[in-house]
Image: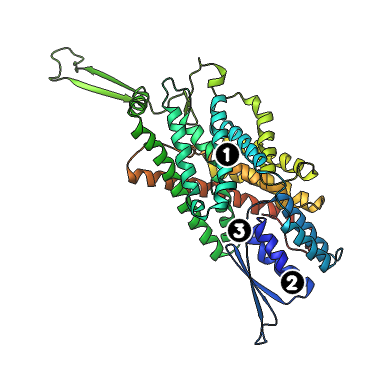
């Protein structure tokens, strides 16, 4: 039981299901144990509640999604509960899974982050080909610092996300202020930090609150909101820092913004032609809905193809590419049938997302709910019919819905305001957008379970899905 609790925490199992999975295993194995789950800790108590002496254990682990290891844990869990494997053999298997090193090296995982950052720049934030390269490099550096430096230094780990946001925003602003609008600041900055967005944390917290797990859900939700404020503030600091260091960049940025305004000087004249209105007047007209701005990026129709948004037919290979690299970056083994299922489910979720966006533009919560409903039905049917692991098959598609929903809601950055109150307001708006997307995904996942599990026999083991 202790090894199972350790594995579920360490490999990113759905936290709102952990207590039910452990309670089911304890009941079937007659372990007489009770469990309390709080973030990153499981309290396990062995013994009869009526007896005065009980044995209490604290299991602690910092969870990070590892799909292949988590699927192996679920296979061992299911075999032991169905008497297809002994408890001793299952314990040895879990110990070997815990002690196994990551299946990919540091450079491979950084390369996968490069591909993910490049493709999501186009898919969600309207970037061009040259924006793809810059955002991919930012994602590469982000992943390297997170897996190498942040794991070795506890001091740097505390400021890792803020430092990454400052660096990415600094680079994006430096490139975005080049005359001629060669690069898009919004696309590069949003895609560069998309790997550290707390979308999955907010999703898990919403699932926990829906499952009446108030303690874990509220703690994770508050943490994710504060984390998003730090992230948005770091992006603003990086942008302002470059504008302070380079005074010409501020001039170029103001000139670019001024192009959206038209100013006329003149006087009023009456139609019946007697005398003009005394005094002159200055009129300013602002173009609020510029047809050349796509997802926050300015795109002239006369520009060459490598400076414009990629055509729609590129989605046919960009979406599977992102889904494949996202699954591999979450430590899914390359040669496995489960990987094909993950990519297929993620592509179906993206198609549902894109179709619903055509009919309900701007409704990021409803759009995310439609995509989550599709992937939830596919994942639960796959678990029910094919006897697969629903959670690991659905993770890639669910993670895909988070940046897609944020991009449809306006991206990470909505403006270039510089006052402190507006900076915190922009960060709070970003947190609200992520919460809206997470709530939509939560509703879609729970409704999909109603469709699949409303009929049929009861499962002997605990449900291993979102």
Instruction: Report helix, strand or loop for mark 1.
Output: helix
Q: Position of residue 86 (x, y in %)?
A: 85, 67
Task: Identify the element where label 2 is drawn.
Answer: helix
Closer to the camera in the image, 201 or 146? 146
Q: In this view, does 281 lie above or below 72?
A: above
Mark 1 or 3: the one toward you: 3
- The image's colour scheme reads rainbow
263 to 398, vertically: above or below: above
Number of dots carrying numbers: 3
Residue at x 36%, y 22% (from the top left corner):
259
Camera-nearest residue between 137 and 273: 137
Q: Earlier in the sequence, mark 3 or mark 2?
A: 2
Q: Quadrant of the C terminus?
A: bottom right
- Nearer to us: label 3 or label 2: 3
Q: Looking at the image, is 304 positioned above or below residue 322?
A: above
Nearer to the camera, 386 or 331: 331
Q: Where is residue 42 in the image (x, y as percent from the top left)?
A: 63, 67
Give x and y (percent) for residue 115: 63, 34
Cα–Cα span, label 1 and label 3? 27 Å
Q: Indicate which disc, 1 or 3, sits on the residue closer to the N terminus.
A: 3
Query: What residue appears at the point 81 percent right and 66 percent down from the top-left corner?
Result: 81
Q: Is mark 3 on a helix, strand or loop?
A: loop
The numbered dot on residue 62 is: 3
Check residue 26 in the rendering and tell me which mark sits there, or answer none: 2
Residue at image location 41% in from the left, 45% down from the top:
233
On the question of residue 416 being in view, the answer is: no
Which quadrant: the N terminus? bottom right
Is 4 left, or right, of 150 in this rendering?
right
Question: Can residue 215 be spotted in the picture?
Answer: yes
**Residue labelled with disc 1:** 404
First of labels 2, 1 by sequence position:
2
């Amino acid at each position: 039981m202790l090894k199972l609790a350790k594995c579920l925490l360490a490999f990113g199992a759905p936290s709102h299901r952990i207590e039910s999975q452990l309670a089911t295993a304890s009941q079937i194995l007659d372990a007489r144990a009770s469990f309390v789950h709080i973030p990153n800790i499981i309290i396990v108590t062995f013994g009869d509640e009526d007896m005065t002496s009980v044995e209490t254990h604290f299991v602690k682990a910092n969870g990070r999604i590892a799909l292949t290891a988590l699927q192996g844990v679920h296979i061992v869990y299911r075999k032991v509960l169905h008497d297809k494997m002994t408890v001793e053999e299952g314990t040895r298997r879990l110990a070997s899974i815990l002690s196994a090193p990551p299946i990919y090296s540091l450079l491979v995982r950084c390369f996968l982050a490069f591909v993910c950052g490049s493709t999501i720049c186009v898919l969600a934030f309207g970037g061009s080909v040259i924006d793809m390269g810059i955002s991919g490099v930012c994602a590469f550096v982000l992943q390297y610092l997170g897996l190498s430096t942040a794991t070795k230094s506890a001091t740097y780990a505390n400021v890792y996300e803020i430092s990454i946001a400052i660096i990415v925003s600094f680079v994006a602003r430096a490139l975005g202020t080049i005359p001629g609008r060669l690069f898009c600041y919004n696309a590069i900055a949003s895609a560069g930090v998309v790997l550290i967005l707390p979308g999955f944390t907010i999703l898990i917290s919403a699932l926990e609150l829906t499952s009446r797990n108030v303690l874990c859900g509220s703690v994770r939700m508050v943490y994710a909101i504060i984390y998003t404020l730090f992230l948005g503030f770091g992006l603003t600091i990086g942008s302002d820092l470059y504008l302070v260091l380079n005074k010409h960049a501020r001039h170029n940025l103001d000139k670019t913004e001024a192009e959206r305004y038209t100013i006329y000087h003149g006087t009023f004249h009456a139609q019946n032609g007697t005398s003009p209105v005394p005094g002159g007047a200055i009129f300013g007209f602002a173009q609020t809905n510029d047809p050349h701005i796509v997802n926050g990026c300015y795109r002239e129709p006369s520009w060459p193809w490598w400076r414009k948004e990629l055509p729609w037919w590129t989605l046919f290979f960009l979406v599977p590419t992102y889904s494949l690299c996202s699954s591999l970056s979450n430590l899914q083994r390359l040669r496995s049938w489960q990987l094909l299922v993950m990519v297929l489910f993620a592509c179906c979720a993206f198609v549902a997302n894109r179709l619903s966006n055509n009919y309900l533009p701007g409704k990021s919560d409803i759009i995310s709910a439609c995509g989550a409903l599709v992937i939830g039905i596919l994942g639960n049917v796959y678990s029910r019919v094919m006897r697969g692991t629903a959670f690991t098959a659905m993770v890639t598609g669910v993670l895909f819905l988070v940046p897609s929903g944020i991009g449809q809601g306006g991206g990470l950055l909505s403006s270039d305001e510089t006052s402190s109150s507006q900076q915190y307001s922009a960060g709070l708006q970003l947190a609200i957008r992520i919460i809206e997307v997470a709530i939509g995904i939560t509703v879609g996942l729970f409704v999909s379970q109603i469709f699949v599990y409303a009929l049929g026999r009861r499962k002997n083991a605990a449900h291993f899905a979102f």
